[in-house]
Amino acid sequence: MIWHIALEDDWRDAQLSGLYLISTRGMTLKEVGYIHCSKPEQIEGVAQRFYADLRELLLLEVDPERVESDIVEEPPAPGVSELFPHIYGPLPITAVRSVRQWTRGETGWILPDQGPEKTPELSEPFSE
């Protein structure tokens, strides 16, 4: 599994269209060319670097087998050696196994349980 950090409004838009089209915070797939994703051990660092001013996020668990576009592991920027999975096309919501609320506590982001035994087979439409 790979992970994508999302904002609630962006995920709601995806529920209406059936496709998630956000690359990263404030930037679309069309602008960047791919959707930024992370391996499990990378998501907390990404949240600390790019979402530290927020208190709540959504964490999308993506099944790469259900993504039709190419997924390439590569550096997120020139000069960075760490490799991240990038989806080179839209993310169908049917490829999202689970959507989890993610909260930042006093000492940083508190990761939700990542065990597959606690996730539904497919993501349900986001509801309040």
Image: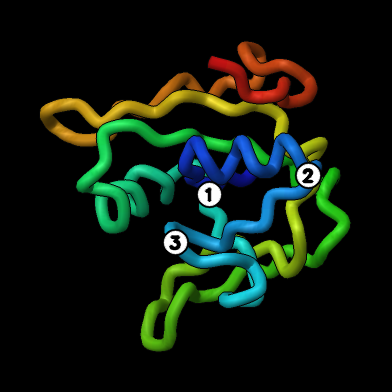
Residue marked by disc 1: 39
Element carrying mark 3: loop
Q: Nearer the viewer, residue 29 or 97?
A: 29
Query: Farthest residue toward the left?
Result: 106
Residue at mark 3 to residue at mark 2: CA–CA distance = 18 Å
Q: Nearer the viewer, residue 89 or 115?
A: 89
Check whether the beta carbons of the residues at disc 1 and disc 2 lie within 8 A of each other.
no
Residue at mark 3 to residue at mark 1: CA–CA distance = 21 Å
Instruction: Give, as a three-letter code, the residue at label 3.
Output: Gly
**Relative to 25, is 54 on the left or the right?**
left
* Quarter that holds the N terminus: top right
Q: Position of residue 89 (x, y in %)?
A: 76, 65
**Relative to 46, is 97 on the left or the right?**
right
Q: Earlier in the sequence, mark 3 or mark 2?
A: 2
Say if 119 sits above or below 54 in the image. Answer: above
Q: Nearer the viewer, mark 1 or mark 2?
A: 2
Which numbered tag is attached to residue 26?
3
Residue marked by disc 2: 17
Say if 42 sits above or below 115 in the image. Answer: below
**Relative to 74, is 104 on the left or the right?**
left
